[in-house]
Amino acid sequence: MSETNISVPKETLSPTDCKGLADVLASVGDKWTIMVVGALAKGPLRYNEVQRRVSGISQRMLTLTLKRLELDGIVTRTLFPSVPPRVDYELTELGQTLRGALLPLHLWAAKHRDAIVRNREGASGES
Amino acid sequence: MSETNISVPKETLSPTDCKGLADVLASVGDKWTIMVVGALAKGPLRYNEVQRRVSGISQRMLTLTLKRLELDGIVTRTLFPSVPPRVDYELTELGQTLRGALLPLHLWAAKHRDAIVRNREGASGES
DNA sequence: CGGCATCCCGTTGGATACTG
DNA sequence: CAGTATCCAACGGGATGCCG
């Protein structure tokens, strides 16, 4: 095993683990998931607040994403039986760890976004 | 100040950046992307070797993923004009940094996979 | 306000077959 | 071996409308 380097776990992914990972990664790596988790990173938010923060998201995808996250134990849903009704979403402990794992990717995307876009444009229709 | 306004680091998404990020994240957070980058982390691989490592991937998705990664400057494609032809794919410097940003997520997925699956099953059919 | 149901279309992505 | 091309099924995801 590599000692000098961060030893990559079972990167020699056994076909089975590979698929299990793919499943979780597909769910967790989803763009809406990433952005919703990012939005909730600062603290609990109401349904509409999340939607406002993520801006591009539709009601459908917001609901579906939140439901999946709740199912997966990433967020908690708290209903205040007031009128008008109020619902808060908040990251669980697990959600906090996910956010931590997502942060490097987030930062990477922000940092190299320009380089990537330039690569794309430069490679295709360069005069 | 808890969540008054955007007072958290720069990972706080301004609506515009948010969409730019969404684009990059959607591409980079894609499950096949993550797994291909993970496969290439150890060193250059041939087309078929990548496919074998990622196992579940189809030729179509492998080709598309590799092409996008090449376009984005994440991997390099090296053709050896031998017969039979041989093509090596390798992470660029940018790709290495991406891999670094992806690792935490990878580890997180591996670590909490069980918990997530259990959450899913436990929450729905508690038989 | 929060959220489900429905329609409906575009994209994703697998399976298959063919080429250099 | 390393792709490319086509077909087609499934899913994603926006728009709209209704209910608690």
Image (cartoon, coloured by chain):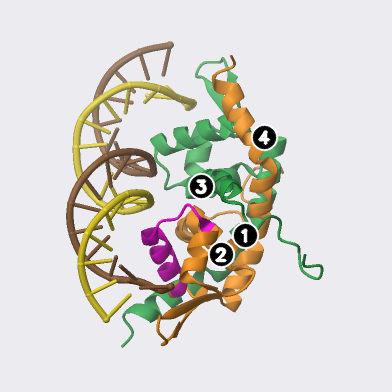
Chain colours: A green, B orange, C yellow, D brown
Q: Is B83 situated above or below C4?
A: below
Q: Is B11 situated above or below B93?
A: above
Q: Secondary structure at mark 2?
A: helix
Q: Count residues near mark 3 (Cα–Cα under 10 Å), then give few for <14, some for 14-19, many for 20+.
A: some
Q: Secondary structure at mark 1?
A: helix
Q: Pointer 1: what residue?
A: B102
As drawn, is D14 to the left or to the right of B85?
left
User: Where is residue D9, by image quadrant?
Assistant: top left
As drawn, is A30 to the left or to the right of B10?
left
Based on the picture, tell me whether residue B50 belongs to the magenta stretch: no
Q: Secondary structure at mark 4?
A: helix
Are discs 1 and 4 both within one chain?
yes
Q: Is residue B77 visible?
A: yes
Disc 3 marks a residue whose amino acid type is Ala
Q: Residue at position x 62%, y 72% from top?
A: B96
The answer to whether mark 4 and mark 3 are in CB contact below 8 A is no
Disc on the earlier residue, 2 or 4: 2
Disc 2 marks a residue whose amino acid type is Val
Q: Count residues near mark 2 (Cα–Cα under 10 Å), then give few for <14, some for 14-19, many for 20+.
A: many
User: Where is residue B34, by image quadrant?
Assistant: bottom right
* Magenta-highlighted residues: B54-70
Disc on the earlier residue, 1 or 2: 2
Disc 1 marks a residue whose amino acid type is Leu
Residue B82, horizontal then vertical, whole percent: 42, 87
Mark 2 → mark 4, Cα distance in angstroms: 25 Å
Q: Quadrant of the C terminus of chain A?
A: bottom left
Mark in front: 1 vs 2: 2
Q: Secondary structure at mark 3?
A: helix
Mark 1 → mark 2, Cα distance in angstroms: 9 Å
Q: Can you tell which mark lies on residue B58?
A: none
